[in-house]
Image (cartoon, rainbow, N blue to C red):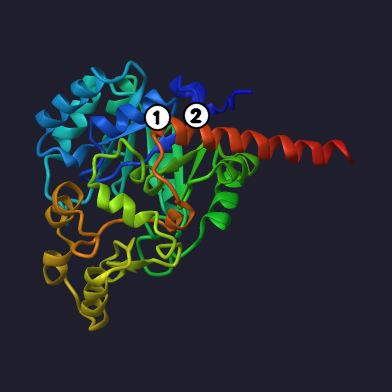
Amino acid sequence: MPLRTALTEMLGIEHPIIQGGMQYVGYAEMASAVSNAGGLGILTGLTQPDPEALRAEIRRCQTMTDKPFGVNLTILPALIPADYDGYARVLAEEKVALVELAAGSPKKYTPMWKAAGLKVLHKSATMRHALKAQEAGVDLIEIVGYEGSIAGGQKGDEVGAWVLLAKATSTLKVPVIAAGAAGTGRQLAAALAMGAHGITMATRFLCTVEAPIDIKIKETMVRPENDERQTTIVLGSLSNATRVFKNEVAQQIRDIEGKGDVDFSQVMPLASGQRTKKMWQQSGDTSDAMWSCGQSLGLISDIPTCQELVRRIVQEAEERLQSSARMMSKL
């Protein structure tokens, strides 16, 4: 039976699975593949160099799917100077199904987006951010555990999804989406059982046929030795803690941060988005860039199509939920 939740009903999608925003990965090829598989694909706004380029990418995605899709907008003006007002306006004008807002406060743009008929999801790594986002009027809260690529953000925010999700679903009034190292149907079932209305996956979707990244990266991700222990945290000293693949570049960043009194200019050559973009699209050298990677890496063992991955996750979730229901029937 189909899994029907507030997420699927709100957006008119078949399955309660969102593909998270991924810088220099969230192009139309990725988003349309997930949407065509019945989930909600997400374009990454800042992957496009300016608002009009984002408009063009939205329209290109519309030629590749007739299903709903969304756009991630990550607001980090101190690290990424951009025309955020322009990007936000384009989303309203193009009437995408959903905005996945990360890092910044939703207060400024939510009224405009909702007036245009968009649904607004806030990506929250802490309960304090989730409560503020709810107060600002968002439609959904995506609660992200420390296992994921957004690893808390600030010192002291190192809280896993198991605790955050239980607290969020018992505290928040808006529907909650579980995020942070999700990659299996068992996790989807667990999230739904805890009161969430779906899951968001990013790292798992990297390792699919349609993900527009070099095949060598995908082949690295499926190696047995690259398990859940093969990630590390960087940029915590800059209040932007991020979980990344454990490699030489990540260790160099950690070494710089370990010296104390760090500003972004000291790590910028290593943490540069352009360096990561080159890895994704040209070299495929996973040791030569800082790249976001959740602990779901340890759950990846193949490179399926998005259609096959989503089908498999939903089927497993249904089986787990039915098994749990049978436990209750025996009481």
Mark drawn on residue 3 = none
Residue located farthest toward the right when viewing the structure as drawn: 331
Residue 50, given in percent of the width and then of the height, sits at: 10, 36
Q: Determine whether the residue tagged by mark 2 lies in a helix, strand or loop.
A: helix
**Is 251 above or below relative to 125?**
below
**Is 118 above or below relative to 193?**
above
Crowding at label 2, few (<14), some or many (≥20) Cα neighbours within 10 Å?
many
Q: Residue at x 39, y 66 (%)?
A: 230
Mark drawn on residue 40 = 1
Q: Quadrant of residue 18?
A: top left
| Residue on which the image places disc 2 | 7
Residue 89, given in percent of the width and then of the height, sits at: 19, 28
Quadrant that contains the C terminus: top right
Residue located farthest toward the bottom when viewing the structure as drawn: 259
Q: Quadrant of residue 321?
A: top right
The answer to whether residue 49 is left or right of residue 247 is left
Q: Residue at x 38, y 23 (%)?
A: 36
Q: Determine whether the residue tagged by mark 1 lies in a helix, strand or loop.
A: loop
Crowding at label 1, few (<14), some or many (≥20) Cα neighbours within 10 Å?
many
The answer to whether residue 125 is left or right of residue 219 is right
Q: Which amino acid does label 1 sit on?
A: Leu
Label 1 close to label 2 by CB (< 8 Å)? yes
